[in-house]
Amino acid sequence: MTIFRGTVLDTPGELGDPAGLRAAEDCALVVHGGVVVARTDPASARATYPDDDVVDLRGGLLVPGLVDTHVHFPQVRIIGGLGMSLLTWLRDRALPEEIRLADAEYARSVARDFLRGLATSGTTTALVFGSHFPQAVDVLFEEAERSGLRVTSGLVLSDRILHAELLQTPETALAAGRDLAERWHGRGRLRYAVTPRFSLSTTEAMLDVCGELLRAGGPGGGRWFTSHVNENVEEVGEVLGLFPGTRHYVDTYDRHGLVTDRSVLAHNVHPTDHELEVLAAAGAAVAHCPSSNAALGSGLFPLRRHLDAGVRVALGSDVGAGTGFCLLKEGLQAYLMQQLLGADGAPLGAADLLHLATRSGATALGLGDEVGDLSVGRQFDAVWVRPRAGGTLEVALRQATDPTDALAKLFTLGSPADVASVWVGGDEVTAAYTPTAGERR
Ligand SMILES: [Zn+2]
């Protein structure tokens, strides 16, 4: 069907694998039915598949589609609220905007802005925090289906503390969650995630409902679970006060059966050692959102402690509290944060940053057999980075000494402006969103 020819960089091994980066200059990826069926040199590909079209991507870098494991759909229009800590930012910025999504048409326009933001940043797969309103979640899934992106999302549940408009009862949450999950889970590239906002805004009764919704998906291949944990010291203190007798924040979820290998908890900046043990034993993953953690002053993420404990970690942009959709920037921020931690930090190389933004995310979301690298047998989810001639990234890449150096330059300088094309399952998804090649130059 199609032969994609270019310089391919990916990280098919484990995070921290000394083999690290797999780099192939002038590589040919043969894609049939959206799947990579051969990975070879251009002459061999041409000889074996003489009828296939050739898409020439030389002059840039082809990397796997980026995977965002924590990003809030309703917050695209409030990015940039600097100068606040978590609970103030929620009260003054995030929640007033989230209330506006009660209007389904408003929600639809936000969903389109949101999905465009993902696609044009090279994000092909995302675990998306939905809305508190069922009709807005329906709208998100409708638009996500149209976009072609791989989206896992769900109704955000809360029954205390937040503005009254954002609250449900456990009974209404159960009915609405069931209805949405039955409609959308497993439909094409879409999946359902049970999504309490955080323990702070959910009672034991609501967390019971979450457990029921999660178990209703059945064992294996079932629904997903996501929420927030240990983001901010003040928040952690309030949560522990609301759950007397609980061992720690992770336990507020764990005792309702919500910490499994299909669980992704965002932030975890302030975990206890026992929480890390619980997460590792369950096979749960943590979505590390470095820009958000820095912007809200939440703290320096203890990546080394996570990795030493065996907890899986991937990247999230968070979006409203973060600084945009670009996972290249999140990779850079993760690197900078570990540098600031000095001896307590986990030193990250360029290959690690690519892994965190692709393969780590795919495995955290249970999609490691389908996406996350560009091996034979994977879906062709890919990003072609083609920096503008004369721009700083293009200038720096020309001086790159080897593929690892090129990748380091990409994470340091890359932005959505450098994303030329994005494919999901072999289909180009950015065509509807980005200027044509001629307009770019
Ligand atoms: Zn969040």
Image (cartoon, helix red, strand yellow):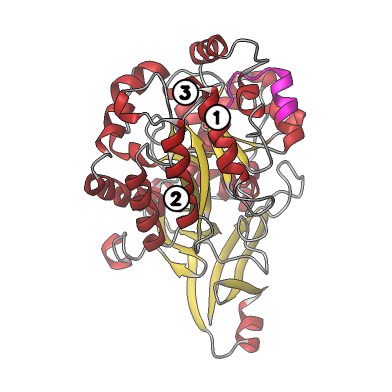
Q: Please tell me whether mark 3 sits on a helix, a strand or a loop.
A: helix
Q: Residue at x 63, y 46 (%)?
A: 355
Q: Residue at x 53, y 15 (%)?
A: 239
Q: Position of residue 428 (x, y in %)?
A: 42, 67
Q: CA distance from mark 2 to mark 1?
A: 18 Å
Residue 169, quarter of picture: top left
Q: Is residue 109 above or below residue 1?
A: above
- The residue that label 3 is drawn on is 294
Q: CA distance from mark 3 to mark 2?
A: 37 Å
Q: Position of residue 198 (x, y in %)?
A: 50, 26
Q: Is there a contact, CB below 8 Å, between mark 3 and mark 2?
A: no
Q: Position of residue 199 (x, y in %)?
A: 52, 23
Q: Please tell me whether mark 1 sits on a helix, a strand or a loop.
A: helix
Q: Please tell me whether mark 2 sits on a helix, a strand or a loop.
A: helix
Q: Earlier in the sequence, mark 3 or mark 2?
A: 2
Specify start and end residues of the magenta stretch as a single range: 267-278
What is the count of numbered marks?
A: 3
Whether residue 366 appears in this view of the structure is: yes
Is residue 165 rendered to the left or right of residue 272? left
Viewer-side residue, 122 vs 209: 209
- The residue that label 2 is drawn on is 179
- Identified by mark 1, the residue type is Leu
In the picture, the quarter occupied by the C terminus is: bottom left
Q: Is residue 321 above or below residue 423?
A: above
Q: Is residue 269 magenta?
A: yes
Residue 419, quarter of picture: bottom left
Q: Which mark is residue 207?
A: 1
